[in-house]
Amino acid sequence: MTQRINSNSMEELTLILKRRNVVPKKQKNAVKDTDFTRLNENRQILEQAYAYWRQLENVRSRFMRSYRYHVGDQWSDMLSVTYKNGKVETMSEEDYIRNQGRIPFKHNYIQNIVRNIIGQYRSGTYKTRVISRNKDTLQKSEMLSMALEAALSINKANDILDPRLLEQFLLSGLLPQKVGYKWWPEKNREDLYLENMNPNRIFFNTGISDPRMLDIDFIGEIIDTSLDNIVASFAKTYNDEQKIRKIYRDNQHYYVRGESMQQTGSGMDNNSLDFYSPQDDSMCRLFVIWQQKSEWRMYEHDYLNGTYKCTRRKVQQIEALNAERIAYAAQNGIPAEEVPVIEYKPKYESYWHYKYLTPYGECLGEGESPYEHESHPYCLSAYPLVNGRIFGFVETLIDQQRYINRLLNLYDWIMGASAKGVLLVPEESIPDDMDINDFAEEWSKANGVIKIKAKAGAQIPQQISANSTNIGINDMLSFMMSTFLQISGVGPAIQGQQAKSGTPSSLYAQEAQNSTINIKDIVDHFYAWKKDRDLKALRVIRQFYKEDRILNITGSGYLNEIGTYKVSEARSLKDLDVDMSPVLNTPLFMQAAEDQLRELFMAQAISIETYLGNSTQPFAKKLLADIQKEKQQMANTGQASPEAMAMVQNPDAKQQMLQRAVGG
């Protein structure tokens, strides 16, 4: 009869099985070796990417039009001009106006509106915090909040990247950003890396309808870089380097330039981007394409170590591993039903697969997503995505901007064509010893004298100045400017303009608050995207931080104990234990928190140590350290300092010390 083992023996068996490697090996999603084969398959993927890129041409064209109006190029729209002889010519509006001998004036209201919205965003900064749903892990979630804040600070996300992406979002309606991990030479370590992307260089599957972008299954970008950078990234041997250089050298004329966006401008603006060929001949074109694929996988529950994961192993491999465990246990007198085996079930699983392709179809690298979040590195959002349409906020202001420019030019043309100081001189009034030029020269002098022999019934010279500009243009211009502000939602109050005399402050504040309602949908959409971005960034941090590190965050109210990122504690938190929540981080909010802390201290509800530990005042940390140092000295010597004795004898001493510290 087989002897059953006790719990201690089972633990010993588990350790023995693990030492004998009778456990499933961890599946690695490493980049495969360089692969230059399967050209036909890769070229089909490129054609699919090109088709999606072409379908987004309307989005890019409207983005570039909004961009031109934003930077002041507001007369470059093309129009067809028909001449009297029947000839039709296509030219820009600026050329058409200049051909008529006029100057195309413009007053750029769009840029002021965009700057105001960006200013409103900067003045109402939000700080992302990790919120734990379990009260026992609050300190760990605070540690992750600090780690995320430190990583975003390294990337200058709140100062540079996000405001510029918001500006691009107002123009295009797209929010594309890459969330990855790289080596920072100036920091001498690896860390989170964020990169804003140009809407002209991205492509994804069209026909999407989910505003959360959950139905994306094909996404990628166009990269132009030097050949040396490509070699450094993908060549593992000298032969690989020669193959890569040969690919770009021999196939540089393989593709003829395809159709490109028909806008004029410099290459820096990406106005004439071609899909297959770079704008700069010294650069090499590379495509990064992520596809969502599906295949049969195996979900395994290993009772030996309590793991539950998805693998690519076959049924025969799992059964062989279980048989090995059972056989080893039988040699030690352990029944088969006591052996911790692997339970499994097949499932048709979706996964993300990436490829780095040249314009000629060669694959320089491919593999399954290396990220633990099992998705692509892009954080993409589109607005408003109603009926599949994507457009920017600025596009709704272009017609009003055009009409304002038209009224300004009409005003200027009428003023230029009106009579201003025209002199009417009857011929019989011109003296015999003068001609019309002499008469005009003498008339224009400040002290000129002209002798005239007035004949009976003859008119004397007179000067005419016609005021033909008061035909309603001023009223129409004021109406259009008012309409422009109403459509944009950025009224005078939110712009900080001076209120009319007698306007109550409460009414002015209410007007400013109401003005923000019109742009609240756009701003909240940006914050929702930012929340998704920060969550993906947090997952990257948890995956790639391999060792503990100091988090250099100043001015926060976090506890000193969590100033260090601890890998083991961070990885112990599951995604279900954390959430992303924006928290106001404005001076007004911080001052309100300071006032509440001070009231609690004055009411003796908290100690001086608690107050200083949670305060964000610059003196708080140093003062707390001094107090703790004095307490330590008192504990060692058994004698209190004069200051400490004064605090004991005088109940108001603590309040006086705090008032001296805060200058109260």
Image (cartoon, rainbow, N blue to C red):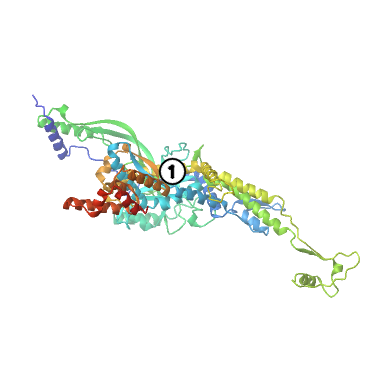
* Mark 1, other Cα within 10 Å: few <14 / some 14–19 / many ≥20: some
Q: Whole-percent x and y of residue 518?
A: 53, 42
- Kindly identify the residue that appears in the image at 85 percent across and 71 percent down: 452
Tell me the quarter of the image containing the N terminus.
top left
Report whether 546 appears left or right of 513: left
State whether residue 547 appears in this view: no
- Kindly identify the residue that appears in the image at 41 percent across and 52 percent down: 159
Q: Nearer the viewer, residue 102 or 367?
A: 102
Residue located farthest toward the bottom when viewing the structure as drawn = 433
- Kindly identify the residue that appears in the image at 49 percent across and 39 percent down: 385
Residue located farthest toward the front when viewing the structure as drawn = 649
Q: Secondary structure at mark 1?
A: helix
Q: Whole-percent x and y of residue 412?
A: 67, 57
Q: How many labels, in total?
A: 1
Report whether 525 appears left or right of 11: right
State whether residue 224 appears in this view: yes
Q: Which residue is mark 1?
A: 527
Q: Nearer the viewer, residue 607 or 603?
A: 603
Q: Whole-percent x and y of residue 220?
A: 41, 46
- 588 w.r.t. 579: above or below: below
Q: Nearer the viewer, residue 97 or 486?
A: 486
Q: Whole-percent x and y of residue 483?
A: 61, 45
User: What's under tag 1, amino acid-wise?
Assistant: Tyr
Residue located farthest toward the right when viewing the structure as drawn = 456
- 309 w.r.t. 585: above or below: above
